[in-house]
Amino acid sequence: MPGTGPGWRHAGGLSGNVRAAGDVPGSSRTLAAHPARHLFRRPARESADCSAPPGLRTPPGPGPSCSLLHVPIDATQETHLDEDMHSWLAFANQKIEEISLLTRAFNEGTASIDSALRVNRQTFESRRSSPRVHNEEVARRVQAVNQQMAQRPHAHGERKQQQQEVLKLPPLPTTTIGSYPQTADIRAARAAYKSGKMDRERYEAFLKQEIEHVIRFQEEVGLDVLVHGEFERSDMVEYFSEQLSGMLFTQQGWVQSYGPLCVRPPIIYGDVARPHPMTVQWAQFAQSLTARPVKGMLTGPSDHHAMVLCAR
């Protein structure tokens, strides 16, 4: 078929590995001049200044470092974001535009895109110096981290004894993983709340009714350690991420997770901080409904790492 053949992708600039590969008949070459997994605009000057080594019959052209399958399609669809944040983003369509710009620089020289490079540099510097990206309190706390923080002050046996004195659990206590079904009524109430058709007071009252219902059900069936059902959470990541600073949510930023499943993960754009408690309110309310212990439910760090797009 015309136009097909093996392709070569060279990362890290044009150096000896390009020459060593030689010219393969029918093949094409691509310089991985653009980091495809980054979600923000990158400084284009260093890529634009690259040049192919002499003696190649088929000089490489600029391209992404990997498939654009891993990023959302178009940042222009995120109309809810402010001007600064919107200008920082580079999804698949914006990356193609930047690669097209680099192609022009490769073919016509860097001077042909000087004005675009100036705008690119201003955008990059705007994000790099923004106080929205750098949180001094987070930096201070990171500097204060020490090895003692990873050590528990009491041995496991001592902690286990104290826990049993308080909880008085049987040798094999029964419980559930945590989340209960998100029924049609729950989803409808959440949609009404997010669209403004239901105010916060009514929405939280509805959630408390659902929590009390599931607490009574667990008491009736005889579970030892109860859960509150997690009805206030849309999923295991969004609920936490939307309460953290340094993270943003998209409206159309869908990416493939695995197989046919697509997700719309939050994006880390700066230092992440927790400005207020996220789960205490619901855990305290659930515990107030029963004399049996109610465990607090948190999404594990591995799930957050897998479902959050790191864009820094």
Image (cartoon, helix red, strand yellow):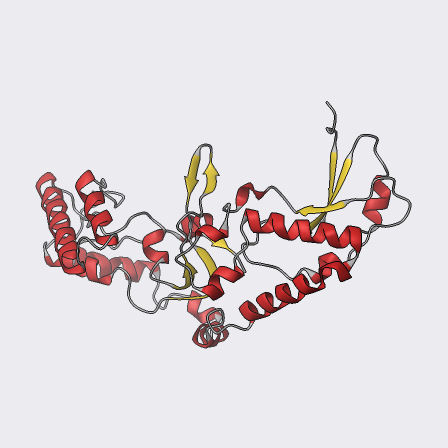
Camera-side residue of 148 and 297? 297
Classify residue 273 by image quadrant: bottom left
**In percent of the image, x 72 and y 61: which residue is there?**
46
Q: Position of residue 270 (x, y in %)?
A: 48, 65
Q: Is residue 172 visible?
A: no
Depth check, front residue: 9 or 84: 84
Which quarter of the rendering shows the N terminus?
A: top right
Q: Is residue 67 left or right of residue 169?
A: right
Residue drawn at point x = 83 percent, y = 40 percent: 58
Whether residue 241 is visible: yes
Q: Nearer the viewer, residue 179 or 256?
A: 256
Q: Position of residue 179 (x, y in %)?
A: 25, 44
Asked whether, in this view, residue 292 is left or right of residue 84, the answer is: left
Residue 264: where, in percent of width, then height? 41, 47
Is 78 placed left or right of 284 in the picture?
right
Quadrant containing the C terminus is bottom right
x and y percentages locating residue 100 in the rendered image: 67, 49
For this orientation, the residue located farthest to the top is: 1
Q: How many numbered marks does the figure carry? A: 0
> Which residue is depicted at the point 39% across and 50% down?
251
